[in-house]
Each structure stands twice: as C-alpha cells, then as structure tokens.
Amino acid sequence: MKKIRNIRLLTCGLVGCLLGGLLVGCEREYDDPARYKPVEMTPTMTIADFKSLYSSNSLEIADDIVIAGQVISTDRNGNFYRSFYIEDGTSGMEVKIGKTGLYNIYPEGMTVYVKAKGLCLGAYGDMVSLGAPPSEADKNSNYQNTWIDVQYWIDQTIFRGERGEAVTPTVITSMNQINSNSNLFGRLVRFENMTFQGGSLDTWAVSDNPDTDENEAAYGEQRLQFADGSGTVVIRTSGYSRFADSQVPAKGSIVNVTGVLTRYYSTVQLVLNNSTDVEVVSEP
C-alpha cells in the first residue's frame, strides 16, 4: 500500500508540474502581448481640405493622399457601430471600418493616419465620410460608400499612431456658430447651457428585447434648445447602445452635453459616446 501511495503522489506531482508549467506558459504569453509600434506619417492634406474634394457623388481617391486625426468616438457603449470619427483641428469625419470592438484598437485620443488612395469619399444625408467604394446594392440604398471590412485592406490604409490625451471638445453656445462653419461637423463638441426639451420617449432609445417580438431596437431622439433661441439640436441614440433604456433628464432641465456633431440634411444631430456626457446643470 505504501508503494502504491508513493506512486500516486509521484504521479500527482508530475501532473501538477505539467499543469503548473502550462499555466506559467499561458501567463507569460498574456503578460507579454505583442504591442503595436506607433507609426508616424506626414499628412498631405487637412481633413477640412480633404472633405472639400467631395461634391455630390461618390469620389474614389486616385491620388496618394494622407490624412491624420485623433479618435474622438468610441463603440464601447454601442452608440457607434463599425466606424470611428477623427478630427485634426480643421474638421472631423467618419472612417467606416467594418469591424466591432474598435475601441480596443483605436481608443479615444489615438492619432490615426489614413492612406486614402483607393478609398471613397461619400455622403449620407449630407454627412461626408470615408469608406470603401460602394456596391450596386449600396448605391440603390443611397449609400455612396461602404465599410472597409477586409483586414488586408484595413492594414494597408489605416495606421495607428501615438496614444494621446482625449480631444478637448469645441464649445458651442449658438446655432450661428454651426451655420457659419460647416467644418464643425464630424468634430467633438460641447453644447453649454442648453434647455432639454425631450422627445417622445423618457429613455434615450428603445432597446431590443430578445424574449418578445413586441420590442425591437429603435433609435430615440431628444431635443436641445440653445439659450439664445437660435435653434435646436437633436440627440440621436441607437437602440443598441448600452444606455438605451436609461432615463433622460427632466424636460426643462439646463444641461451641458458633449458628443460628435453630425447632420442629416438640415437637421443638426449630436451622437453621444455615453449618457454620462450629459451634465445636468439645473432642473425645472
């Protein structure tokens, strides 16, 4: 019996050593992941000048143009989908990458360089973006470009630079600032002392309910009014955002709101990175 017990102990010890070795190996692999090497390029054109190349139709870029900007959006909370926005101080724009979890690869504040040759400038609702050339199906749906979803193509066109601090938003207090400067679209902005007018929902959006067919994810819209009475802005929120079911501020509240400024034709819209980007100054 003693010999059998010793053999069992020896066997357990060997198995333990093997498992321990495997665990150490796994830890070493995860503790020392392959880190990206930040690249540095010289932009050949500002984002504002690049966007001005677009007129009214899809434009496939034939020249060796390089643009650069810092990431100002995040898909961590589900309100941005398969794309991110960058800005360079002159303007901002959406880069349509057909991947999810982009916040892990292109975090806020990171400088991103884009080699635009072969990509396509297009617009939807007068909002200019950069993506891949559209298919016939895209064109039939009024999309002038589409997602860059082939990894090889992403690797040849989108390059990660240094990680920096989050971009300081441009403060806007009047619709007149927007009307006089179209290059504010696509940038991170902060609206101050806005009156929260609300919308048809008491939450930011309608989330998807997988247990019933009654509730499908749907966008929500809430309105803000400038203190000087110069106009209103719509906060548009995806039903797939993590904060879709969160309560909105009370109507009549005075709020400061930070987000990415977009448009849908004549409607000025704001897209939030998170509901915490809405600061309630006072309630009615």
Image: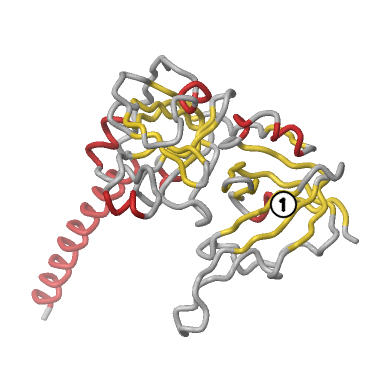
The amino acid sitting under disc 1 is Val
Q: Work out whether 112 lies above or below 207.
A: above
Q: Quadrant of residue 152?
A: top left
**Rendered location of residue 82, percent (x, y):** 40, 49
- Picture colour scheme: secondary structure
Residue highlighted by disc 1: 278
- Left or right, 71 with respect to 177, comes to left
**Rendered location of residue 185, percent (x, y):** 59, 36
Query: Which residue is rendered at x = 41% and y = 14% of the image?
Result: 42
Q: Work out whether 109 lies above or below 277.
A: above
Q: Secondary structure at mark 1?
A: strand
- Density class for disc 1 (Cα within 10 Å; few <14, some 14-19, many ≥20) is some
Query: Which residue is rendered at x = 41% and y = 15% of the image?
Result: 44
**Rendered location of residue 183, percent (x, y):** 60, 29
**Rendered location of residue 24, percent (x, y):** 27, 49
Q: Residue furthest right?
A: 284
Pick the front one: 109 or 118: 118
Q: Work out whether 89 lies above or below 187.
A: above
Query: Which residue is rendered at x = 29% and y = 44% of the image?
Result: 28
Pick the front one: 80 or 119: 119
- Left or right, 235 with respect to 95, comes to right
Q: Work out whether 150 lies above or below 9.
A: above
Q: In the rendered view of the protein, which quadrant contains the C terminus? A: bottom right
Query: Which residue is rendered at x = 9% and y = 76% of the image?
Result: 4
Q: Quadrant of residue 89?
A: top right
Q: In the rendered view of the protein, which quadrant contains the N terminus? A: bottom left
- The number of discs equals 1
